[in-house]
Image (cartoon, coloured by chain):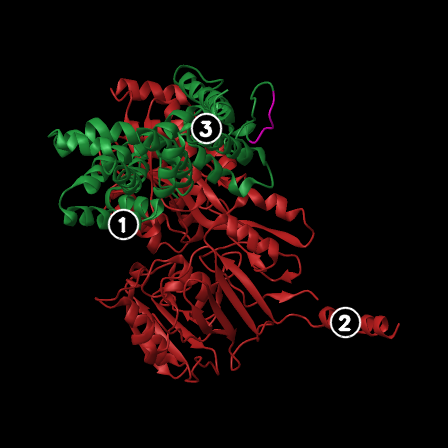
Amino acid sequence: MKKTSLLWAVLLLLWAGSAHAVRTDAVIGLQLEPPHLDPTSAAAGAIDQVLYANVYQGLTRFNEDGAIAPQLAKSWEIAPDGLEYTFTLQENVHFHDGTPLDAKAVQFALNRARTENSTNAQKALFTDIESITIHDALTLTIRLKQPNGQFLFNLAWGDAVIIAPHNVDDLRQKAIGTGPYQVAKWVKGDRIELTRHHHYWGKPPALESVIFRFISDAAAARAAVQAGAVDAFPAFPAPETLAQLAENPAFALINGTTEGETILAINHQRPPFDRLEIRQALAMGINRQDIIDGAMFGYGTPIGTHFAPHHPAYLDLTNTPPYNPETARKILKQAGLDGLTLTISLPPPSYARRGGEIIAAQLRNIGITAQLIPLEWAAWLEHVFRNKDYDLTIISHTEPFDIGIYARKDYYFGYDSPQFRAIMRNLKSASDPQTRTRLLHQAQRHIRDDQVNVFLFQLANAGIRNAQLMGLWQHAPTQALDITGIYWKN
Amino acid sequence: MKRGQSQIIIGGVVLGAIILAGLLSLIWTPADPLAMAINQRMQMPSAGAWLGTDHFGRDILARLMAATPLTLSVAFIGVSIGFIGGVPLGLTAALTPRPLIGQILMRGGDVFFAFPILIMAMLITAGFGGGAWVAILAIGFFNIPVFLRVTRAGALGQSHCTYIQSARLAGKSTARIAIEHIFPNIAPLLILQASIQFSLGVLAEAGLSYLGLGASPTTPSWGRMLADSQTLMGLAPHLAIAPGVVIVVTVLAINLIAEGLRQRLDPRQQNLLGRGQAWR
């Protein structure tokens, strides 16, 4: 009797303990591990996912809805000619190692990003800067060469964050930023642990520590979620299991949008893909909804041009040209390309691997034999992106507002259109919202008319979280996973 | 009934049925194994699709049938490479008058044997790209030392028999003795070993395709069907069960035949088998 009551007491204590101690940590699952910790020199999205807003901050930032908000800059004034931006910095901002942030650090970071030999992956963001002048410790003026309606947007990118000037040689190994979290530990191949920065200038985050765990295998990711080894897995690699997981009340679905335009990219430098009618035939032979349903299990929105559907200036061009395999087959026959054989290079994500199988089956219907070449990321970057050694590839372009890539002559799909470059130039100098919208419509139509690529769908931010874990972003307006606002419900 | 006959008959009938289904797939399948119908994916077995449809709405039975010739021929050609490469080397190692050559061959075989099929396939893929022939080569290379060892052990046992010595005294060359006397006498042993290696070859092909090291993604393959259905186990278990059962039944049938063959070998050669255990 004594024993049983003791046992009950212990159990009661355990229960009380577990019910009232709110967890102060969370584990977030990520499919890809960052190759290193330097957000200013690599295109790898995984770096921003871990570090953007959590560890590193910029003058401005993206909010969950994609809007631009002030961050290290408390406020700014724009000169009437649109050429001078005067920023006032937040007070009492310290880097993780205790050194204060001042206008000098900002000047250093932005100058470093725009110099001749800068290795910044998005150097184009800074090309319009003419000079940066410091007024006092907390105010500085950036002068532009020409008005740029997107300048504040450019400064919000993960590539424009303010790094600690004295850490510049160790950026790849050490992350010293101004964010609410600092990198405490990186176990390569497994996880990165962030802990709270106790001298953070802004509102302190609710959780003491957040761990990013890297699980690339879809089956393992699902097992980790089910076992509770990760508390949330945004951008879940196995969309097919989401509906089933969400039936369990312990889990809640994350279903939002991303900036990922998923395209079937075409190599214009390789005949016969330099011919418009052949590219149009490819587009007519592809049924987008089948790819969304088959590869993403319904998560995704069809797109007809390289533009995000949730953007106010988006044009729905998905029905032009309409899905029409008969016409596609006729065009190919007339061009003497009946029985064309081509290759599709596929990076690891399931949108590409599964999407590739579906596209191969659809192309088979219009008389094209497609060979699939599965590639790991490093091989994809080398063969497809750098060496342009491919026919077709499936890839999601996850940078926000990236229609400008079609103006790059030496970009990997090899599209070269002076008219499109002119549209982009006009857009850059336009600040009037109506003009901008008109130009954006023009740009979207232009790449559709040229059928530069086959535009497939907007990648969804589909994932799963513990139903008690609140404050995660539903949408992914940039390649970031802002965990500064997450907390446990009870 | 002779010993082992029932195993051979049962195994033979099952394997024969699988081979027939595979041959049939070359001219007819119940549906196009490559045709997708996304809106009819993951259907349970029905009159329209006897084993149901997969995650792209393709007919599972048609895909299983269409994958059979590839799987069986990859395993068969792979084992044949091992046989053709390993047996002459094994005979040489056993009968060569120079012990150094025998030593070199055996140690060389040991080095090859140290590489599992998977590592072999990854090396080939890294060097020359993927495809079904990667699986063939990996299985083939893996089997060479297997046959090398079995042949040498068997040939050594025979070489001390009186009829071999009398053949030597009659002036026959070592090569002729190897081909005319030793090979026929160890042939049952080698056939038995080949059947065991064949069933392992089927498993290896499935395993390599499962890992994406075998046939290209669009080609139907038992191993790839398993890999594709892995994350769908909770939603549609029949996607994984169908190829899983086919692999198990095929390997079982071949093993039954091998077991029957083993029982039919005479006791003396069974002893010999005991010494030549080189498979794994």
The answer to whether marks 1 and 3 mark residues whose Cβ atoms lie closer than 8 Å is: no
Q: Looking at the image, is mark 1 or mark 2 nearer the viewer?
A: 1
Residue under disc 1 on the same chain as residue under disc 3: yes
- Under mark 1, the amino acid is Asp
| Chain assigned red | A
**Chain name for mark 2:** A
Q: Can you tell which quarter of the image residue A270 is in?
A: top left
**Chain name for mark 1:** B
What is the magenta segment's predominant secondary structure?
Answer: loop
Residue named by callout 1: B110
Is the residue marked by circle 2 packed among few (<14), some (14-19), or many (20+) residues within 10 Å? Answer: few
Which numbered disc covers residue A16?
2
Is residue B269 something that shows in the picture?
yes
Q: Residue furthest right?
A: A1
Is the residue marked by circle 1 packed among few (<14), some (14-19), or many (20+) residues within 10 Å? Answer: some
Spatial distance from mark 3 to mark 2, Cα to Cα? 65 Å
Residue named by callout 3: B260
Query: Which of B14 and A57 lies nearest the eye of the viewer?
Result: B14
- Under mark 3, the amino acid is Gly
Q: Looking at the image, is mark 3 or mark 2 nearer the viewer?
A: 3
Query: Which of A466 and B191 lies nearest the eye of the viewer?
Result: B191
SS state under label 1: helix
x, y percent for residue B120: 30, 46
- Under mark 2, the amino acid is Ala
